[in-house]
Amino acid sequence: MRTQQAGRSLAVIGGGVIGLSVARRAALDGWIVRVHRTEAHGASWVAGGMLAPHSEAWPGEERLLQIGLASLQMWHRDFLQGLPPDVVTARGSLVVAVDRADAVDLATTGEWLATQGHPVTMTSVARDLEPLLGQSIRHGFLAETELAVDNRALVDALAGLCASLGVTWAPPVRSLDEARDADVVVIANGIDAPSLWPGLPVRPVKGEVLRLRWRRGCMPLPQRVIRARVHGRQVYLVPRADGVVVGATQYEHGRDTAPTVAGVRQLLDDACEVMPALGEYELAECAAGLRPMTPDNLPVVGRLDERTLVAAGHGRSGFLLAPWTAETIAAELKVGVPA
């Protein structure tokens, strides 16, 4: 049903998971929405698609945990409505430790989550839950409400839903003046947000991701997301219909998106230490993306002036926080727009 916003125009700058989620929500509220997007694939295309507030949690990031849990509830409640059911590729996460020091870190996280009122299920028999784990892996915890989605299928499906709601498409812009015909503008173009609004605390952080394809005769796919601490490093294994996504390195390297030998080797070594059977899978793709990070790891979502809003800086949590971001922007849009 159209609301009082009917007839107002909104330009969303950015066609990744954040921009598309904002556009869909605004269109449902009656806005006339135009999305400015590039043909090039951005961070949403090179992502694991994990919806994992417990698994990503770390002491000191209480606010990020809070909004992540709220957004995960939105995924379960209604965000998946209208999307193909097979965009969800896993339900539940198992977080494991490879060595004793990793187990201590994992226990610290588990204890902190419990003090925050969001306990997870600790285990010392992780291989009973996932028999393909390395033989030395015993300690872990289960986060049973977490999900994983096929990031590429989800972005395509959101674009289709937007089109069905009347959202139109336009080329990217180099300045906000190019979108001045819209009543309101939402900046949602990730690492490029500061080029439209100087001073936004968003910077690119490189992360490599691998796609491993199951082959006939290989051991089966894991049934849930596997996240592991491997000698102090983190690696994740995310099931897909045809294999596993492995990620992700993280380091400052400007706008370089070339996968490096060292980064790929580290991911493969760590993934195979966690799940040795992956060594028989096909190495189908190596890619690197640029996460839009902020100094405190919190996204920048809200109003900049009377006709400009921002939804950027989501870092590792763009897919997880897409529903929360869309609802936050929707609430701001309802406050009022310039006459």
Image (spheres, rainbow, N blue to C red):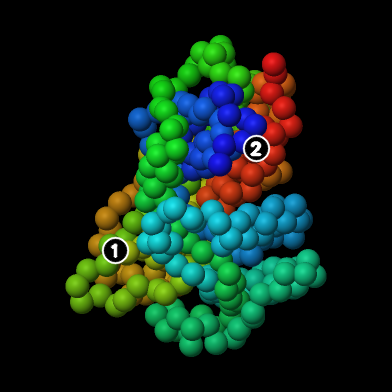
Residue 233 x, y percent position in the rendering: 55, 61
Around disc 2, counting alpha carbons within 10 Å, would you say few (fewer than 14), some (14 to 19), or many (20 or more)?
A: many
Which residue occupies the foreground of this view, 63 or 296? 63
Residue 51 x, y percent position in the rendering: 55, 58
Say which quarter of the image contains residue 39: top left
Which residue occupies the foreground of this view, 314 or 291? 314
SS label for mark 2: helix
Considering only vertical position in the picture, is 91 above or below 122? above
Which residue occupies the foreground of this view, 95 or 172? 172
The numbered mark, 2 or 1, whose residue comes first in the sequence reads 1
Numbered badge on residue 52:
none
Residue 42 x, y percent position in the rendering: 43, 37
Say which quarter of the image contains residue 54: bottom right
**Badge count:** 2
Which residue is at the far front? 1
Q: Quadrant of the C terminus?
A: top right
Residue type at mark 2 is Ile
Residue type at mark 1 is Asp
Residue 179 at least partly seen: yes
SS label for mark 1: loop
Residue at figure coordinates x 48%, y 61% from the top left? 148
Residue 299 at least partly seen: no
Q: Would you say 45 lies left or right of 14 here?
A: left
Q: Quadrant of the N terminus?
A: top right
Residue at figure coordinates x 76%, y 56% from the top left? 62
Q: Would you say 215 lies left or right of 291 here?
A: left
Residue position for label 1:
242
Which residue occupies the foreground of this view, 249 or 115? 115
CA gap between label 2 and label 1 equals 35 Å
Residue position for label 2:
329
Residue at figure coordinates x 58%, y 69% from the top left? 145
